Each structure stands twice: as C-alpha cells, then as structure tokens.
Image (cartoon, grey):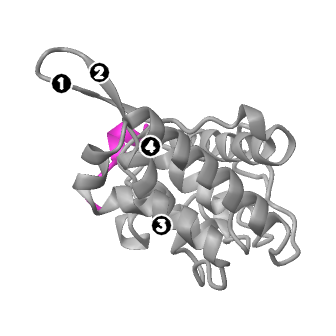
C-alpha cells in the first residue's frame, strides 16, 4: 500500500519506513500518532486519498504492528534486531546492500518533536555515522557495504539503549493488527477512529 500512495514528500519504501519507525521508538519522547503518521507522508496536506476505510485501517494496523515488533526486539531481544536494507542492482547483475534509504527514514524520525538534544559525544558520533549516509555519497563508496550495515545497526541499538534510560516517562501506544472504525483512535485522542485519524 505504501507503493500505491507514496510521493516525493513521503517515506519512499519499506526500508525507509523501517528506519523511520525505528527512530520513533528509540527517541527521548513518544511522538503522538497524528504527528508521526502525517509526517510519514510529508505533512497533513500530503495525506493519501484512500480508496476506502478498510484500506487505511489495514495500512495503519500493519504499520503499528511493525512498529511494535521493532520496539519489542530493541527492548527484549536486541540481538534479533535487523534493519530492513534495500539491495542495489549493478550493471553486471550483482546486488549489494544499500543503507541509504533506511538512514533517510531514521533521520526523518530523529527530527520529529524536539529532536534528540543533549546526546553525549559518543552517541552523537553514532548518530552522525547513521546520518552521513543521507548526504555524503562518498561515504557509501569509501566503506564496505557490509561494514556500513553493521555500523548502522550498532548505532541504532546503542542510541535506543541510551534513550531508554533517559526518555520522558510514558508508555508507547500498542494496538493490534487491525483498528476498527469504532475502536479508540490509536493517536490517544479519546475519539473513535472513524471520527479522528481515519478522516
């Protein structure tokens, strides 16, 4: 469904979405659903024209399910955390990992809310090691792609662990795979889903 509704302003693919959600569950504060869902598309003015209610309900359910899976691995089984990276096809037909899209998504999540202020120097360097792949093409050429993927994964794990011990108290929103029209909206507004973020 992301492929059907993506645009120049939105998260572009599964890898970028995975990076975006990873940053959202890793930061110092919980970003309200309505904010991060709109930002996924580039802002409220770019929200998709859904074909029907069932389509948006299913999309939101799948996104939040994946978000919860990422959070669960980061907290309970960090050794199982594995970012979803794309593969680039070369002229000779072979494929190599690409971390760029994932890092773009991660950056999109980092700047949500008030950003990530006050990171210690070591964590700042780890964050910079992720974000460098969003603006420096030479960085991708100078480092082995497998090494880059490992560094991004280690950075994401370490940054999550840091904020886990320093974040503002608050429980993450967790819902099931499907959000019904009459269920409470996952944004926490207290309204029914059909009266809130569904429209």
Number of numbered tags placed on the structure image: 4
Mark 4 / mark 1, whichever is N-terminal: 1
Q: Residue at x 38, y 36 (%)?
A: 145
| Marks 3 and 2, the one that precedes in the sequence | 2
- Disc 4 versus disc 2: nearer the observer: 4
**In percent of the image, x 29 and y 63: which residue is there?**
135
User: Contact, CB < 8 Å: mark 3 with mark 1?
Assistant: no
In terms of sequence position, does the residue under pointer 3 or pointer 4 come before the other?
3
Q: CA distance from mark 2 to mark 1?
A: 6 Å
Residue under pointer 3 = 128
Q: Which mark is residue 45?
A: none
Mark 3 is surrounded, within 10 Å at the Cα level, by few (under 14), some (14 to 19) or many (20 or more) other residues, namely few
User: Which region shows up in magenta?
Assistant: 1-9
Q: Earlier in the sequence, mark 4 or mark 2?
A: 2
What is the quadrant of the N terminus in the image? top left
The answer to if 3 sits in the magenta stretch is yes
Q: Is residue 161 left or right of residue 48?
A: right
Q: Nearer the viewer, mark 4 or mark 1?
A: 4
Q: Residue at x 51, y 35 (%)?
A: 84
How far apart marks 3 and 2 lie (CA) works out to 26 Å
Element under label 4?
A: helix
Q: Are marks 3 and 2 in contact (CB under 8 Å)?
A: no
- Which of the marked residues, 2 or 1, is nearer the chain's N terminus? 1
Question: Measured from the top left, where is residue 41 in percent x and y?
Answer: 41, 60
Query: Which residue is the site of mark 4?
Result: 148
For residue 95, the mark is 2
């Amino acid at each position: 469904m992301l492929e059907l509704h993506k645009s120049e302003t939105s998260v572009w693919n599964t890898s970028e979405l995975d990076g975006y959600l990873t940053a959202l569950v890793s930061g110092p504060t919980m970003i309200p659903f309505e904010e991060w869902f709109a930002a996924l598309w580039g802002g409220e003015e770019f929200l998709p024209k859904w074909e029907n209610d069932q389509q948006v309900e299913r999309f939101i359910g799948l996104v939040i399910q994946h978000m919860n899976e990422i959070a669960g691995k980061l907290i309970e089984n960090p050794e199982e955390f594995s970012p979803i990276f794309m593969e680039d096809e070369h002229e000779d037909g072979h494929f190599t990992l690409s971390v760029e899209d994932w890092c773009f998504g991660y950056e999109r999540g980092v700047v949500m809310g008030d950003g990530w202020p006050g990171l210690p120097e070591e964590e700042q360097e780890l964050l910079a090691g992720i974000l460098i792949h969003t603006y420096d093409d030479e960085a991708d050429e100078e480092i082995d792609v497998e090494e880059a993927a490992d560094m991004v994964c280690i950075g994401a794990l370490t940054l999550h662990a840091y904020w886990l011990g320093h974040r503002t108290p608050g429980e993450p929103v967790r819902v099931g795979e499907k959000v019904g029209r009459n269920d409470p909206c996952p944004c926490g507004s207290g309204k029914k889903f059909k009266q809130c973020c569904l429209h």
